[in-house]
Image: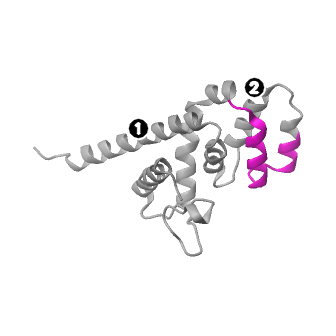
Amino acid sequence: MLASNDSCLLRKIYYLCSEFDGLINFVHPDPSKTAVTSATTLLHAGDKMANEALKQAFQEVHSKIVNSVSPDPVIDVLFSKKVLSSSDNSELLDISIKAQRCRKLLSLLHNSSHPQTFIYLRLALLDEYSWLVKEIDQLLSSSTSQLQQLRLDHSTDGIN
């Protein structure tokens, strides 16, 4: 079952994505935690937009990740989800200094073509770094609020 915060976040990501490209389905990687059910497919466009929104939020908290996160468990999760290749995994594990390993991990993720890179990163951080995920979720919430305001402003253009 989704925690209420996760459900709320997924609704916000869903709204953010639908504002840009119509109705999308956003499915949690764990089928028991599906926010919006899709029988067999997850639309690539929706994934890409949700991932991009998270990518921007993660970029804003880059220094907090570098200074606070132990990267090894995150690397393990991302490797198991095929976000990181075996060569990425080896390269990261060869870096002995935690902060440098985090920087390299974030660099690899920001250059990744995997459609769910930052979705999986958020999930990998959820248990041990809930405070960081909460901050990221607040950044997404702020972006959603700004989009809603822009939509309202646009809908009243020309009306006096």
Query: In the rendering, which numbered label is found on residue 45?
Result: none
Give the quadrant of residue 92.
Answer: top right
Q: Quadrant of the C terminus?
A: top left
Q: Going 54% across and 38% down the picture, which residue do you hit?
A: 57
Instruction: Return the x and y of residue 76 as percentages of the image width and height.
Output: 78, 46
Residue 79 is inside the magenta segment: yes
Residue type marked 1: Ser
Specify the segment rendered in magenta: 69-90
Instruction: Return the x and y of residue 121 as percentages of the image width and height.
Output: 65, 45
21 w.r.t. 141: above or below: below
Query: Does 42 sit left or right of 109 as displayed?
Result: left
Q: Going 86% across and 30% down the picture, which residue do you hit?
A: 95
Residue type marked 2: Ala
Query: Does 69 sit left or right of 43 as displayed?
Result: right
Residue 96 is inside the magenta segment: no
Instruction: Return the x and y of residue 75 as percentages of the image width and height.
Output: 77, 43
Q: Quadrant of the N terminus?
A: bottom right
Query: Does 112 sit left or right of 20 as displayed?
Result: right
The residue wearing badge 2 is 99
Secondary structure of the magenta portion, mostly?
helix
Helix, strand or loop status at disc 2: helix
The residue wearing badge 1 is 142
